[in-house]
Amino acid sequence: MMTKAERKYYNEHYNKLNLNYMKVYNMFLRRLPYVILDNKDLVDIKLDVLEMFYRNQNIGKTVEEVIGQNKEEFFKEVINSYCENTLILNIIKSILRIGLMISLVYIICGLFVERNSGLILCSIPLGILTSLFMYLVIRYVKNDAIGGGLNGIIGMSVPTECYKLSEINESVYTFPTYIIILLIMTLSTIIFCLYKKKK
């Protein structure tokens, strides 16, 4: 959490960014929950990048001059400078961490379902797969509105569909079917993202 002074500094400088700088900065912020684990590092990296953008904007540099032609390389370099471990390892840890948090929500939902054994049993793999799907959306969907909408839909649909399945069939085997569907959707997203990246 930011201190009161840090929050004031953040708001003042963020609101002074032009549209191009703000767009890139927001794209950068969307990466952070999945790669920065320490809260102090999270605050520091937000403020440092904001200060860098604001300073360069004031001397007349365009955002392209600051970050270069490859935004992803810029994001990776900045994030790596704050990460003790490799970027990939941090992403995996964060996907698991966020996935377990989502799983807890699913378990709580399962406690209110009469036939809850399947929902509780499948909550952890469902949570991790949901987290992975959300990361892929954040990583590759450039439009904030579309990305937020997709993550909202998947986040709400998983427990809803599990609840429906629990009412239709008492069998636990119904729930692995839903996991397979979600896994297929996630793999399809990965393939699509890799295809778009190559183009």
Image (spheres, grey):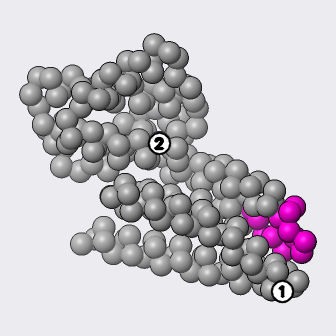
**Which residue has dot 1 on it?**
169
The location of residue 181, given as percent across then percent down, is 62, 81
Q: Could you tell me the amino acid type at mark 2?
A: Leu
Where is residue 63, by image quadrant?
Answer: top left
User: In the image, is residue 90 above or below residue 59?
Assistant: below
User: In the image, is residue 110 above or below residue 175?
Assistant: above
| Residue displayed at 45% across by 25% down | 44
The stretch of residues the image draws in magenta is 110-124
Task: Find out whether residue 116 is within the magenta segment.
Answer: yes
| Residue displayed at 42% across by 30% down | 45
| Left or right of residue 190, residue 112 in this image | right
The location of residue 164, given as percent across then percent down, is 74, 78
Circle 1: is it few (<14), some (14-19), or many (20+) Cα within 10 Å?
few
> Residue 125 shows which numbered tag?
none
| Left or right of residue 98, residue 117 in this image | right
> Residue 32 shows which numbered tag?
2
Q: Earlier in the sequence, mark 1 or mark 2?
A: 2
Q: Could you tell me the amino acid type at mark 1?
A: Asn
Q: Nearer the viewer, residue 188 or 161?
A: 161
User: In the image, is residue 156 above or below residue 46?
Assistant: below
Which mark is in front, 1 or 2? 1
What type of secondary structure mainly makes up the magenta span? helix
Task: Find out whether residue 33 is within the magenta segment.
Answer: no
User: In the image, is residue 112 above or below residue 92?
Assistant: below
Confirm or deny contact between disc 1 and disc 2 (CB under 8 A).
no
Q: CA distance from mark 1 to mark 2?
A: 40 Å
| Left or right of residue 162, residue 113 in this image | right
The location of residue 76, given as percent across then percent down, is 37, 45
Classify mark 2: helix, strand or loop: helix
The N terminus - image quarter: top right
